[in-house]
Image (cartoon, rainbow, N blue to C red):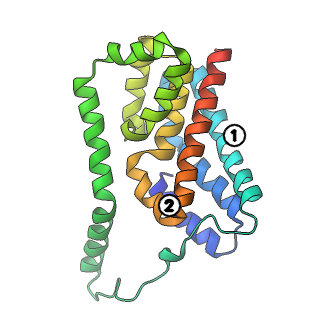
Amino acid sequence: LCLYGTIPIAASCANKGMREDWVAAFMMSSILLNPQLMVYTLALGKTVFLIRLIACLVMGVLAGFLVHFFYKDKKFFNFSGFGPKDGRDVDPNLMLRLLKNIWRNIKTTGPYFFVGIMLTVLFQRYVPKAAFVSLFGSNRSFGVLMAATLGVPLYVCGGGVIPLLRSWLELGMSIGGAAAFMLTGPSAKLTNLAALKSVVGIKNFMIYILFSLAFASVTGFLCNLFF
C-alpha cells in the first residue's frame, strides 16, 4: 500500500499488540513494495526490477532490526492519535460525516501534495533532461548522492516517475543513481511526510529521513560497483 493506506493498518496492528520492530518492517516494506509500482518497474528492465525488489526487501528488514536494537526500552511510533476523538464523526448524516472527514484530510495533506506536484512540474518544464543527466554522468558517486536527495522533493507519483527514469537511463544516468532515486522517492516523498511525522514525532522523523537517504546512497554506490 501507499503510506496513507499503510499507517492505519500499522496502527491497528500495534494497538492489537504487534511488536514495534515488526510494525517498522511492515511499514517500510509496504511503502516500497507496492505491487503496482513493481510491475511498472519492469519497464526499466529485469536488472533494475531485481535491484529494486532486493533493495526494498533489505531496507524493510533493516528498518525492523534497527528499531529492535535501538528502541527496546522506548517507543518509536505513537499511534494514539488514531483513536476516536470527542466531537468527531458524530454527525447523524452519513454523507455530511464523510464530507467533513474528506475536508480534514485535504487540510492536513493538501499543502504537501501541492508542493510536491509543483516542484515536479517546474522540474519537468524548465530543467532540460540532458543537462540534468550530465550531473549524474560526470561523477557517478556524486550522481548517486544527488539522486537520493532529489528523490525526496521530486518524487510524487510512482507510475509517472518510470518514464522519466527510463529517459534518464538512456541519456546516461547510472543504475546506482536510478536505484537511489527509487528508494528515497516512495519512502520520503513530500506528500507522505506529514502523515509520517504525525506517528513518529519530530526526532524519529529526522532519523527516518536520514536512514532513507543513507540506505539509498549505499545501495546506489554498490550498484555502480557491480553494474
Q: Amino acid at mark 2?
A: Ile
Q: Which mark is residue 58?
A: 1
Mark 2 neighbour class, 10 Å CA radius: few under 14, some 14 to 19, many 20 or more = few
Instruction: Tell me where residue 35 appears, x and y as whole percent.
Output: 54, 42
Left or right of residue 226, residue 133 in this image:
left
In this rendering, the label closer to the viewer, 2 or 1 = 2
Marks 2,1: beta carbons within 8 A = no
3 and 80: which one is in front?
Answer: 80
Image quadrant holding the C terminus, namely top right
Q: Amino acid at mark 1?
A: Val
- As drawn, 201 above or below 115: below
Marks 2/1: CA–CA distance? 25 Å
Q: Residue at x 49, y 74 (%)?
A: 82
Left or right of residue 3, residue 220 in this image:
right
Task: Answer with mark 2 or mark 1, whichever residue precedes in sequence.
Answer: 1
Q: Which residue is mark 2?
A: 202
Q: How many marks?
A: 2
Q: Is any atom of residue 33 visible in this view? A: no
Q: Residue at x 69, y 40 (%)?
A: 58
SS class, disc 2: helix
Q: Residue at x 71, y 62 (%)?
A: 71
SS class, disc 1: helix
Q: Residue at x 56, y 19 (%)?
A: 141
- As drawn, 153 above or below 21: above
